[in-house]
Image (cartoon, rainbow, N blue to C red):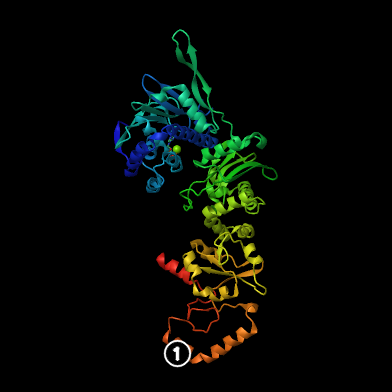
Amino acid sequence: MDKQTHSFQAEVKQILHLVTHSLYSNKEIFLRELVSNASDACDKLRFEALDHPQFLEDQPNLEVRVSFDAEARTVTISDNGIGLSAEEAIAHLGTIAKSGTREFMAKLEGDQKKDAHLIGQFGVGFYSGFIVADRITVESRRAGLPADQGVRWSSEGTGDFEVETITKPGRGTDVILHLREGEEEFLKTWRLKSTIAKYSDHISLPILMRKEEWDADKATQVLKDEWEPVNKASALWTRAKSDITQAEYDAFYQQISYDTEPPLAFTHNRVEGRSEYTQLLYIPAKAPFDLWNRDKRGGVKLYVKRVFIMDDAEALMPVYLRFVKGVIDSADLPLNVSRELLQESRDVKAIREGSTKRVLSMLESLANSEDATERDKYARFWTDFGQVLKEGVGEDHANQERLVKLLRFASTHADQNVSFADYVSRMKEGQEAIYYITADSLAAAKNSPQLEIFRKKGIEVLLLTERVDEWMLSHLYEFEGKSLQSVAKGAVDLGQLQDEEEKKKAEEAAEQFKPVLDRLKTALEGRAKDVRVTTRLVDSPACVVVEEGDISGHLARMLKQAGQ
Ligand code: ADP
Ligand code: MG
């Protein structure tokens, strides 16, 4: 293929502009991003080589090399991973596969430190090279293709890029950054080395740099031909718990999650039994920007004996725990099976179940802790992730009972943090049901006339104001034998909470107002199913209720809004 010029997708142009202008004070992150791409490329090859061992050619050891050339003013990040074909280079380095560019831009806060983390989360890391480079050349050959089917991709990071076919003997990718004026600091071993240590220490394959030695004659450092590893490549999760400090756990979390804050909690275990594996799972302290995207990539990676296999989210964690980040490393899964087979594998299912239970235990121990600061953490977790956890009530029947105990609500007694157990402990003598109301907002719920009689009698009502609540309630009927009852549905039966006197009065009133009710029924024909005398109101003259078993007024409004 002769040299071709392609135009960047519009989104890429925007990203390029933003990245180079708004992340400058954190410019060194380009190295984190390019090393992480190199490491991903090696992971991909390792996996593909399971089925196609010939892909490894005569270079079975996967590694990343970082070097610089002071004269040419270039920094090069090389890997012998999967590589790119010409088509792949055009597709992956010219368009953004993942949607969300607009969200990315909306998310940029002008706080460069936080913004620098976002770039990794959004999968636009490659373009960060242009923070320090005014031209990037990528030379690559995909594993399995002959040497003369290499590709050179080159761009100044403005409107377009060029591609042409080259001959490249070694498999994999070299990303060559032609540094901008003023970026000479990256032409120094220590600067590159310390940046790698800061961001890429956890990468589990060796990152190599050329050895540097003091040359007394020239009175300067000179580069040797020998390469040495500059990262620990330690795969933290394989080390003994007792050897790992809290700071190391936190740093590992921040490296894999691109989070700016340390995690809320983590769990690290070696599981033995039918299937043997290590799990290191984290709960973030804050919701990520894409918490609502149920299809996003997995936060949990599956390894088999330190070899990365997949990060298929659903195979490893239920969707409602999509915020969990971490690593699972199996000791006994076969390495040489396809992703598809792995998803079907009983062992993977066992790992998923085991890990789900672990996460729930982690949450339970926060929620039920003796320690107020731990319980506080749970409250914070609930604020950010509660709505997602509620999805589990409907989706994960096996764990429903545990999940229900983790739910927290607002109620007429407290603005937040009310569990079903709290509610039950405050139930009135003779009260049989757990009462709730659904509404668009807390204010709307609190002001509902349906609550009047409950207020008067001092009966607590749960105030449910989130979209997912209605859906959740269609999967949940009771808590510990107490039925859940909407105060806005049917003829609320207060049962034994109403004394004989009140019941008698209500019956008399029904009799007395029968003619009025009949006339109202005729007047509202086709619009109201029934018109009744009620005891649920104290101050308001009338209210609309739906029939038991019908969808609530709140849900009806939501569906209408959604155009259904
Ligand atoms: P992400 O890594 O999140 O996918 P990037 O912008 O960092 O986003 O990279 C975009 C894509 O470019 C990658 O998904 C990959 O397909 C390709 N790519 C980047 N660097 C390499 C590399 N060293 N080897 C092979 N492919 C690469
Ligand atoms: Mg990347």
Q: Is residue 518 above or below residue 115?
A: below
* Disc 1, SS: helix
Please identify the residue farthest to the top as the structure is shown: 217
Q: Position of residue 422 (x, y in %)?
A: 63, 63
Q: Quadrant of residue 252?
A: top right
Q: Quadrant of residue 89?
A: top left
Q: Is residue 112 left or right of residue 485?
A: left
Q: How many marks?
A: 1
In this view, the residue in front, 151 or 558, is 558
In this view, the residue in front, 511 or 442, is 442
Q: Is residue 145 above or below residue 73?
A: below
Q: Ligand 1 within 8 A of label 1's CB?
A: no
Q: Is residue 116 left or right of residue 6?
A: right
| Residue picked out by circle 1 | 519
Name the residue: 45% across, 87% down. Answer: 520
Q: Quadrant of the N terminus?
A: top left
Q: Is residue 457 above or below residue 337?
A: below
Q: Position of residue 149 (x, y in %)?
A: 39, 30
Dot 1 alpha-carbon crowd within 10 angstroms: few under 14, some 14 to 19, many 20 or more: few
Answer whether residue 171 is visible to the viewer in this image. no
Figure quarter occupied by ligand 2: top left
Q: Quadrant of the C terminus?
A: bottom left
Q: Position of residue 391 (x, y in %)?
A: 54, 58
Residue type pointed to by label 1: Arg
Q: Position of residue 19 (x, y in %)?
A: 37, 38
Answer whether residue 495 is visible to the viewer in this image. yes
